[in-house]
Amino acid sequence: MVLAARRADLLEQVAATCRQASGEALAVPTDVADEIQCRALVEKTIATFDRLDLLVNNAGLAVIAKLEDYTDLRLFQHTMSVNFYGAVYCTYYALPYLIHSRGRIVAVSSLGGKAPLPYNSPYIASKFAMHGFFDSLRIELMRHGVSVTIVCPYWVVTGFHEAQLDKDGIPRGPSGRAIYSKNMMTAERCALVILQAAYQRQREVLMGPGYLITWLKLLAPGLLDRIVIAFLKATVQRERKNALQV
């Protein structure tokens, strides 16, 4: 297993846990927004293990703001660089080896790749772009026996919302966890669902109300817009309530 993320200390902790479980793990600090680092990640993988069987594109971030409130488009571009181009870079450089192994590609998207969400325009744009890219790539790779699985999680309890940025690029910090509830999916459960889908070479995985959202967008898009607004209001209220309890 080759693990890639920006924070080298935390990355090495995860690698150590894998080794304790009798696995082989290589930690490669990588910023996927940098094409050169993505290429180096694949090169180190091949140099160490001499093959590549599965690529999981999981890096992602979000900026919460109205488009009119951005002082410039640098944060918008950064979000696209990480969420979309990071997946493109890693996939491009891994592709020759995945074709050789008849391997698997996983793109971790979001239900935001299926339906719009206000105040999240760069995030939603990046996820819609991922769907178009990987759906097209799937067709290209059919003749090579390489599968492409797009995963659309719902709410998963991670550090994602703590790392969310505002219009000035400032992370939300610990208060971001107030958005979660005890009934939401754990990261461990989500990872298991993703691995099972990759093993079965599934085309797409929709979590939570994913199928309902897909059909509403097709049959009643106006109704879906109103549901999204109501959902956001409820989310903000829950966040404020949980923050007060903390």
Image (cartoon, helix red, strand yellow):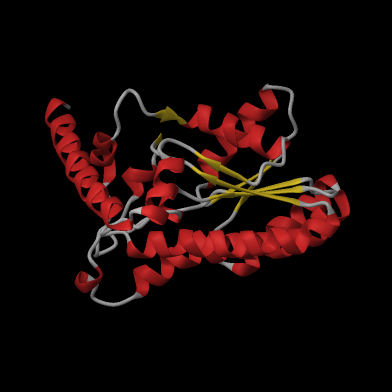
Q: Residue at x 22, y 65 (%)?
A: 66
Q: Quadrant of residue 151?
A: top right
x, y percent for residue 17: 61, 27
**Quadrant housing the C terminus:** top left
Q: Quadrant of residue 155?
A: top left
Q: Nearer the viewer, residue 147 or 177?
A: 147
Q: Residue at x 70, y 58 (%)?
A: 138
x, y percent for residue 198: 68, 39
Q: Is residue 171 visible?
A: no
Image position of 36 (left or right of 185): right
Q: Is residue 196 visible?
A: yes
x, y percent for residue 173: 28, 44
**Quadrant housing the N terminus:** top right
Image position of 132 (left or right of 176): right
Q: Residue at x 25, y 58 (%)?
A: 166
Image position of 174 (left or right of 46): left
Q: Quadrant of residue 130?
A: bottom right
Q: Residue at x 46, y 48 (%)?
A: 110
